[in-house]
Image (cartoon, rainbow, N blue to C red):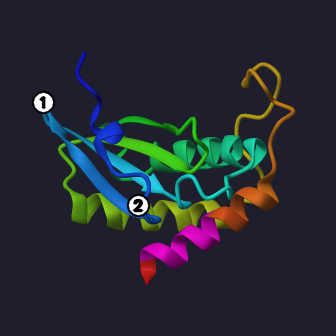
Amino acid sequence: MDNIKSFELDHDTMTPGFYCLGEANGVYTYDMRFKYPNKGDYISYAALHSIEHLFAVVIRNSEIKDKVVYFGPMGCRTGCYLLLFGIKEEQAREMTIKCLKRCLDLDYVPGTQPKECGNYREHNLEEAQAEIKAYLKVLQG
């Protein structure tokens, strides 16, 4: 069985950043790497869950909303995947930064009612925004 692209990356040398993992049928897969892999510092479940809700709502309400194929957390809790149709790396990075900044403007986590979320009790806006701020520093140099 063939490996997926992200498993072919050397996680021992990978650093936080924004990476294009490739393109297939017009869909670009981006690795939003918040943390160093395998270093013991991971995003908490509650923060990662909140980042998922915040960013997903913000980007799906942005000017590229019709180009969003998927956004979701990595199981390893070091970042998220963003899949965009026809959006190349430079524009994807710019939109990611713009949307992350918008996430910092929100004073609530969207979609946290029992009818909206399968684990509505596990969210933490403060931790999510702290992780987003740290990631923005990486992206903005």
Q: CA distance from mark 2 to mark 1?
A: 26 Å
Up the image or down, 106 lies above or below 83; here it is below
Which of the pair 37/20 is nearer the observer? 37
Of badges 2 and 1, nearer the viewer stands 2
Q: Identify the amino acid type marked 2.
A: Met
Up the image or down, 101 lies above or below 47; here it is below
Residue with the most extreme top position: 1
Residue 133 falls within the magenta-colored stretch: yes
Asked which secondary structure carries label 2, the reply is: loop
Q: Which residues are magenta?
A: 132-139
Which of the pair 43/69 is nearer the observer? 43
Up the image or down, 52 lies above or below 107; here it is above
Rendered location of residue 133, percent (x, y): 63, 71
Mark 1: give few (<14), some (14-19) or many (20+) Cα within 10 Å.
Answer: few
Asked which secondary structure carries label 1, the reply is: loop
The residue that disc 2 covers is 14
Which of the 4 image quadrants contains residue 84?
top left
Q: Is residue 137 left or right of residue 141?
A: right
| Viewport quadrant of the C terminus | bottom left
Rendered location of residue 107, percent (x, y): 77, 59
Rendered location of residue 114, percent (x, y): 82, 22
Does the magenta stretch mainly form a helix, a strand or a loop?
Answer: helix
- Count of labels in the image: 2
Residue 41 falls within the magenta-colored stretch: no
The residue shown at (45%, 67%) is: 98
Residue with the most extreme right position: 121
The residue shown at (43%, 43%) is: 81
Q: Identify the amino acid type marked 1.
A: Asn
The residue shown at (71%, 56%) is: 128
The residue that disc 1 covers is 25
Q: Is residue 83 left or right of residue 58?
A: left
Residue with the most extreme front position: 12
